[in-house]
Amino acid sequence: MPSKRRLRWVAIPVGIATAVALAGCSPTELHGFLPGFVEDGTAATNQTDRVAGLWVNSWIVLLAVGIITWALMGWAAVAYRRRKGQTGLPVQMRYNMPIEIFYTVIPLILVMGMFFFTARDQAEIETQWDDADVEITAIGKQWAFDFMYAGEDDDLSDAVWTMGVQAQPDAEGNIDTEKLPTLVLPVDQKVHISLQSRDVIHSFWIIDFLYKKDMYIGKDNSWSFIPTRVGEYAGKCAELCGEYHSMMLFNVKVVEQDEYDEYVASLREEGNTGDITDAYDRLNNLPGTTGTTSETDSEEEGE
């Protein structure tokens, strides 16, 4: 059996080699090839690192368990294989208490450990702020999103909003992303988004933010986070919601506070003010529609 000193001298270069290998990894590789990270390592939100850490560490534990399990299976297959000249069954072992305790306790510890870290991170991510800097309502509908930005008044009389239509591909299937509904967020500000649905269950997913939440009828959902990197991101519905589900796309723009204020002011100048629920009339969201309905159209539909 090798001495402790020899093992120590073996472990040191292995540890150094591992550290050097990890140091050469890009932020994308260190975060398990998940989206939401750039070369300088800046995360998209204050929760993105937490989600990525849970993902990567879970895979590390699972791979370690897998390697040990596969190694034991291979060792057993070789060590206890049938040899030339042997006949009949090998000696059977029953009620080996140490082994039974081992393969009961170890999986239990693994499950409890993964549950603890998942519950801890989920509780942190799901914490909703009552003192958010920005209050936004995102509304899912077949097959697009509406966004309302709340103001100071509780009755939403000074809120502003935009209504979106589904993606409209050309003959070759290309989508003009500039025409998609766009959610604008101020960087480094506390954002609280209330998630609602007008028809069926949808799912609000900003891909690089590494999080998504369902949108229900009659049960509002919510999400609180801080955007930490200026940029443009893609979003989509992640819940099968009907014929044009794949066209239920939207953009996210994280901008500086001044640009956000200018955007809200531009919506107010366009007359998109008040509670969006009062302004809304269910759109005929088929390709080619403009995404607006006039009062005359509404009256005709009512008749």
Image (tube, rainbow, N blue to C red):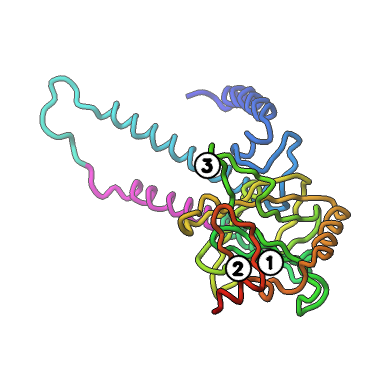
Q: How many angstroms separate mark 3 from mark 1 (CA)? A: 35 Å
SS for callout 3: helix
Secondary structure state at the residue bearing disc 1: strand
Q: Give the residue at mark 3.
A: 59
For the point 81% across and 73% down, the residue is 158
The x and y percentages for residue 249 are 60, 51
Image-quadrant location for residue 31: top right
Q: Which residues are magenta?
A: 93-116
Q: Which residue is at the front of the view, 274 or 43?
A: 274
Closer to the eye: label 3 or 1: 1
Q: Residue 283, image x and y in percent?
A: 59, 65
Please rate how many residues cluster around mark 3, counting C-alpha atoms within 10 Å: few if below 14, some from 14 to 19, many from 20.
Answer: few
Residue drawn at the location 76% of the way across and 55% of the way down: 185
Q: What is the spatial separation of the Cα atoms under label 2 and label 1, in whole angstroms?
A: 7 Å
Query: Quick one: 194 or 246, which is closer to the camera?
Result: 246
Residue flagged by tag 1: what amino acid is it? Thr
Of pointers 2 and 3, the one earlier in the residue sequence: 3
Residue 214 part of the magenta-drawn span: no
Q: Which residue is mark 1?
A: 137
Q: Earlier in the sequence, mark 2 or mark 1?
A: 1
| Residue to which mark 2 is pinned | 196
Dots 3, 1 in contact, CB < 8 A: no
How many neighbours does mark 2 have within 10 angstroms: few (below 14), some (14-19), or many (20 or more)? many
For this view, does 187 lie left or right of residue 178? right
Asked which secondary structure carries label 2, the reply is strand
Q: Earlier in the sequence, mark 3 or mark 1?
A: 3
Is residue 115 one of those drawn in magenta?
yes
Locate the C terminus by quadrant. bottom right
The residue drawn where x is 71% and y is 62% is 162
Q: Overall secondary structure of the magenta stretch?
A: helix
Residue 72 x %, y % = 37, 34
- Kind of residue indicated by mark 3: Trp
